[in-house]
Image (cartoon, rainbow, N blue to C red):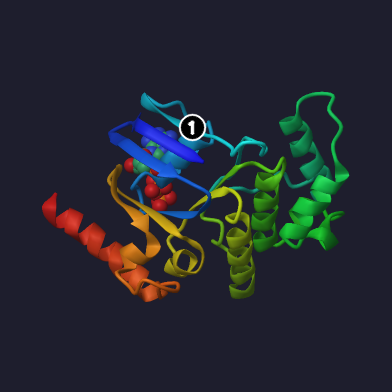
Amino acid sequence: MLVATSLVKKRGEFVLGPVDVELDVGVSALLGANGAGKTTLMQLAAGLLRADGGSIECTAPRGAAGGVGYLPQDFAGPRRPRVRDYLRFVAWCRSGKGQQIREKDIDHALALVDLTERSASRIGSLSGGMVKRLGIAQALLGDPAVIILDEPTVGLDPIQRREIRGLLQRLGEDRSVLLSTHLSEDVASTADHVVALHAGRVVFTGSTRGLAGGSATGRPAAEAVERGLIALIEGRTAHA
Ligand SMILES: Nc1ncnc2c1ncn2[C@@H]1O[C@H](COP(=O)(O)OP(=O)(O)OP(=O)(O)O)[C@@H](O)[C@H]1O
């Protein structure tokens, strides 16, 4: 679960917040125009930035593993290491010095992103889409209760995008997944919940169906999600 309370962060002229959101188990999409503050909010949740006010916390359900997995927007990874060695190194860093790395955890992460057959390849020899999937794999190591993915489908081909959307849905069954995206298809096909930011402020939080203004059952169409988001942003701009 991810809970932000009166969260504020200043970055030059830009101010994020105050943000109050509570995200439960499931997939939530963080939406907003360029510069709205999505990456800033995600970096705060991942512990990479320190808040200027309020708090943001990621917690696990009772008995589950804790922690946060994070895929940065510009994930590239180092070029020389082999895929498996890189994931072993990340797992070692996360688990604390001297702890045994469980090879089956590496196998599991590789299988989830369909990189098992490239586990002995050097990262520099992977395609852009494969590097993105490696970035998702490293975010899944340690089985974190909260997974934060900054634009996880950018650079993927249509088949990979469909696979990653399926993976996001599966991950959201028993943990909180927060993804930022500009693709309304990602939102319509994976997200139960939407948080929309405009100029650092939360302008909508609620169900994806609520944003799309659609029927009470089934997933909304991508076009309806896009219309809902554009109406929100244009409404805010008109009132600014
Ligand atoms: N390191 C930084 N130093 C100063 N200002 C920054 C820094 N990083 C981002 N900002 C500013 O913070 C604001 C929000 O940026 P952020 O990257 O969070 O937006 P975003 O919604 O993720 O945008 P995009 O969709 O383009 O990725 C922008 O005005 C940006 O210029």
Q: Residue 5: image x %, image y %?
A: 37, 32
Disc 1 marks which amino acid? Glu
Q: Residue at image x 37%, y 44%?
A: 37
Q: Residue at x 72, y 43 (%)?
A: 141
Q: Position of residue 67 (x, y in %)?
A: 62, 35
> Residue at position x 36%, y 71% from top?
216
Q: Is residue 55 left or right of residue 63?
A: left
Q: Is ligand 1 within 8 Å of the beta carbon of the residue shown at mark 1?
A: no
Q: Looking at this rendering, what residue extends furthest in the front direction?
A: 62
Placement of 44 over or under 235, stated as above or below: above
Q: Secondary structure at mark 1?
A: strand
| Image spot of residue 91 (x, y percent) | 76, 37
Place of residue 94 in the rendered image (x, y in percent of width and height, measured from the top left): 72, 32
> Can I make out residue 199 in this image?
yes
- Residue lying at 68% horizontally and 47% vertically, measured from the top left: 140
Note whether 175 is above or below 8 in the view shown: below
Ligand 1 quarter of the rendering: top left
Which residue is nearer to you in this view: 127 or 236? 236
Neighbourhood count class around disc 1 (C-alpha, 10 Å): few under 14, some 14–19, many 20 upward: some
State which quadrant residue 80 falls in.
top right
Q: Is residue 152 left or right of residue 32?
A: right
Q: Is residue 202 above or below residue 228?
A: above
The residue to which callout 1 is attached is 57
